[in-house]
Image (spheres, grey):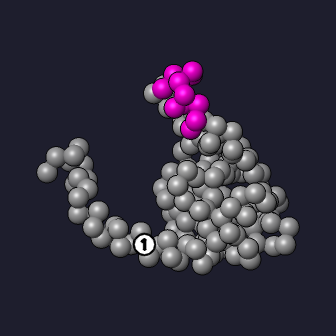
Amino acid sequence: MAFFLSTFKNKVDKKGRVSVPAPFRSAVASGNFPGIVVYRPLNLPCIEGADMSFLEQLSDRLYGDFGPFNPDQMSVATAILAGSSQLQFDPEGRVMLPNELRDFAGIDGFATFVGLGRKFQIWGAEAYEAHREEQLAMASETAPKLPPFGGGGQS
């Protein structure tokens, strides 16, 4: 599975094409789809993305945890899986962000790619700065509550 780190701000052209950061393209290079998968998250005004294996694992988890006919499974599958777009890289490493997702996330002119480990987000540049400040404030309170590394949740 791909792993995404760092933050990158890239120009979006008038057609909605944006260059995916080279480290993100490298992270998905070994996968079975030559591109990224993006979708509208459930709780933030941005675009989320990952490699195909992340969405496959999400699908497996939804069916395994809820079963194929459970209404909870159906709602999350409809929101995420049905709303996903597979974006193949062009020869320059760009993708065409769907208009609907660009409008939802307020992406116009520049897009900020934010690596979050197994997935990433794409934000409008100004909106990301406000979100980042909120997250940093929350992290200073949350981080001390995390279990120690390698401790399996025990101190």
Per the image, the residue denoted by label 1 is: 134
Report whether 64 appears left or right of 19.
left
Report whether 155 appears left or right of 37.
left
Span highlighted in magenta in the image: 66-76
* Label 1: which secondary element: helix
Report whether 67 appears left or right of 93.
left
Please state which amino acid type lies under the numbered disc 1: Glu
Residue 70, image x, y percentages: 53, 24
Is residue 66 positioned above or below 79 on the image?
A: above
Residue 68 within the magenta-colored segment of the rendering? yes
Which residue is painted at 55% across and 65% down in the image?
Answer: 114
Q: Which secondary structure class fits the magenta region best?
A: helix
Is residue 79 positioned above or below 16 on the image?
A: above
Q: Nearer the viewer, residue 104 or 94?
A: 104
Which residue is painted at 71% across and 58% down in the image?
Answer: 101
Which residue is painted at 27% across and 67% down in the image?
Answer: 141
